[in-house]
Amino acid sequence: MIDEIDLKIIFALMENSRLSFSELAKSLGISRPTLKKRVEELVKNGVIEKFTVKISEKVLKRSYSAFAIVETDKPEEIVKLKCVNEVYKLCGNKYLVSMKFCSMEGIRETFTKLTEFSDSVEFYPCLTKIKENNGLQLNVEVKCEVCGRKTDDFSFVDGKIVCNLCRE
């Protein structure tokens, strides 16, 4: 079971996985051995799968995004495309595809490739990113450190668990 300390550890590591255990333990107000044990348990229980690096899209020069709904009997062909980030199977032979590109030419080329092995392609170039989620959506109830209310709708702000009513 994940508790509030585990959540703080997870959020802190998501924010900066390069923090030393000493720094992180101090910021959370717990001992280094306690932190180490909790992180090991989170890894052992599969809560934390890996520690990773997020590379800036600017450095990768992949500043164009697009989504496509592709109907095909050959999903393996979608996966082969270098620009593809994620593929989700929908109903039937439909797939939702998330892609990143270096240029508008890359978008055109990919659209052409998709039509070669697909029955239908709905292509949606992305105009603006409105929100990027860190992927953490846990079904746990915690106590807001601002108002004290119990909630399952919270964020991690300045090292504190804050209900989304107090955040606004």
Image (spheres, rainbow, N blue to C red):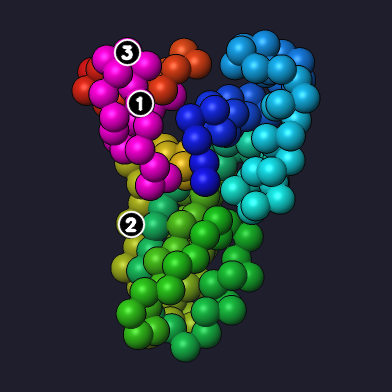
Residue 151 belongs to the span the image colors magenta: yes
Report the residue marked by disc 3: 146
Give the mark toward the camera: 3 or 2. 3
Q: Mark 1 points at which residue?
A: 143
Task: Assign the C terminus to one quadrant of the image.
Answer: top left
The answer to which quarter of the image holds residue 51 is top right
Q: Name the residue under label 2.
A: 124
Measuring from the top left, give residue 158's x and y in whole percent. Answer: 46, 13
Residue bounds of the magenta highlight:
138-156
Mark 1: amino acid: Lys
Type of secondary structure dominating the magenta stretch: loop
User: Real-space Cα distance between discs 1 and 3?
Assistant: 9 Å
Residue appearing at x 41%, y 22% in the figure:
161
Q: Where is residue 78 in the image (x, y as percent from the top left)?
A: 54, 72
The amino acid type of the residue labelled 3 equals Val
- On the picture, is 129 further left or further right than 40? left
Foreground mark, 2 or 1, reads: 1
- Name the residue rendered at 48%, 80% in the picture: 116
Q: Is mark 3 on a helix, strand or loop?
A: loop
| Residue at disc 1, secondary structure | strand
Does residue 125 sit above or below 88 in this rendering?
Answer: above
Residue shown at the point (39%, 84%) measured from the top left: 93
Q: Where is residue 87 in the image (x, y as percent from the top left)?
A: 49, 65
